[in-house]
Image (cartoon, rainbow, N blue to C red):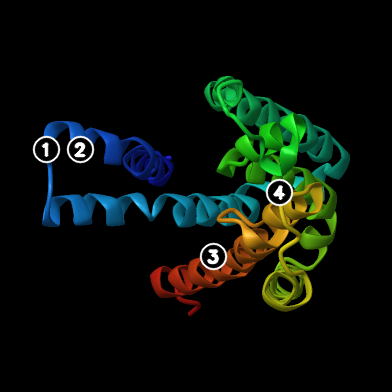
Amino acid sequence: DQTRGLAILAMILAHFGPGLWERIGLQGLSVDILSLIGRFATPTFIAIFGFTISFAYLEKARADPESLRRRLVSRSGMVLFAAIAVSVPSYMQVFWLETYWGGSLALQVLLNSYSVLLFYAFAIFIVAWILPRLAQAPTTAPAILGSGLILSGTWLGYDMWQSQGESLAEWMRLILVSGKYALLTNLGVALLLVVTSRVIVDALLEQLWPLT
C-alpha cells in the first residue's frame, strides 16, 4: 500500500506537475528531479501489478479459480469504467477540434481514451483467464508467458506491424505494441516480476530462517 501511494504521488507529479511548475516559476534542477520522479509512476504500477499476482492471486487461484475469475473480470469492468470517466474532460475537448484523428469522431474518442487505466482494464481481464495456469506452475508459466509477450510485442512493434496511419488498426497497434502503456510488453514485464518476486522472497526467507 505504501508503494502504491508513492506510485500515485509520482503519477500526480507526471500529469499535473509541468503545469504547476510553470505557474509558480519553478525551473532548473528541481524540475528535472521532480520530472524524473514522475517517470517512475508507470514502472512502479506495473511492478505492483506483478507482485499482486504473485502474493495475492496465485494462492486464491489454487483454492477457488472460478470465484477469483469472476471477481477479476468484474474488477476489469470497473477499471474500464474508471478509464472512461477520467477521460470525460478530454472527450469534451473533441467538440472544439477542427479535424478529427483519422477523420472520424469515433476514432478521436478512442484515441482520447488511451491511458494507463485502459491498460489495467485489459491486463486484469487477461490475467483473470490465465491465472489457473499460472497457479499450476508459478515459476515456469509466468517466465515463459512473460518472455513471450515481451518478445512478440517488441518484434511486432518494431518490425512486423508498421504504422497504419490514422486508423482503427493504428489504435489497436497503439494499445498492443507501440504505445507508452503497450499491453504485450508491459503485461510481459508484470508476469516476469511474478517470478522475480518469488525468487526474492524465497531468498529473504532463507536468510532470515535458514534450514538447520
Tell me the quarter of the image containing the N terminus: top left
Which is more toward the observer, 29 or 60?
29
Query: Image quarter for residue 67?
Result: top right
Judged by depth in the image, the label closer to the viewer, 4 or 3, is 4
Image coords of residue 165 (percent x, y)? 72, 57
Query: What is the C-alpha distance between the residues marked 4 and 3?
Result: 19 Å
Image coords of residue 39 (percent x, y)? 37, 54
Image coords of residue 162 (percent x, y)? 74, 69
Decide: few, some or many residues near mark 3? Use Cα within 10 Å; few <14, some 14-19, many ≥20. some
* SS label for mark 3: helix
Image coords of residue 203 (percent x, y)? 48, 74
Query: Image quarter for residue 33?
Result: bottom left
- Residue position marked by numbered label 3 in the rendering: 197
The amino acid pointed to by label 3 is Ser
- Residue position marked by numbered label 1 in the rendering: 25
Query: What is the C-alpha distance between the residues marked 3 and 1?
Result: 42 Å
Which is more toward the observer, 23 or 134?
23
Which is more toward the observer, 158 or 14?
158
Rendered residue at 68%/31% (across/down): 109
The amino acid pointed to by label 1 is Gly
Badge 2 or badge 3: first in the primary sequence: 2
The amino acid pointed to by label 4 is Ala
Q: Is residue 52 left or right of residue 175?
A: left
- Residue position marked by numbered label 2 in the rendering: 22
- Residue position marked by numbered label 4 in the rendering: 123
Judged by depth in the image, the label closer to the viewer, 1 or 4, is 1
Decide: few, some or many residues near mark 4? Use Cα within 10 Å; few <14, some 14-19, many ≥20. some
Q: Identify the mark at residue 159; answer none if there is no mark.
A: none
Rendered residue at 76%/60% (across/down): 164
Tags 3 and 1 in contact by the CB under 8 Å rule? no
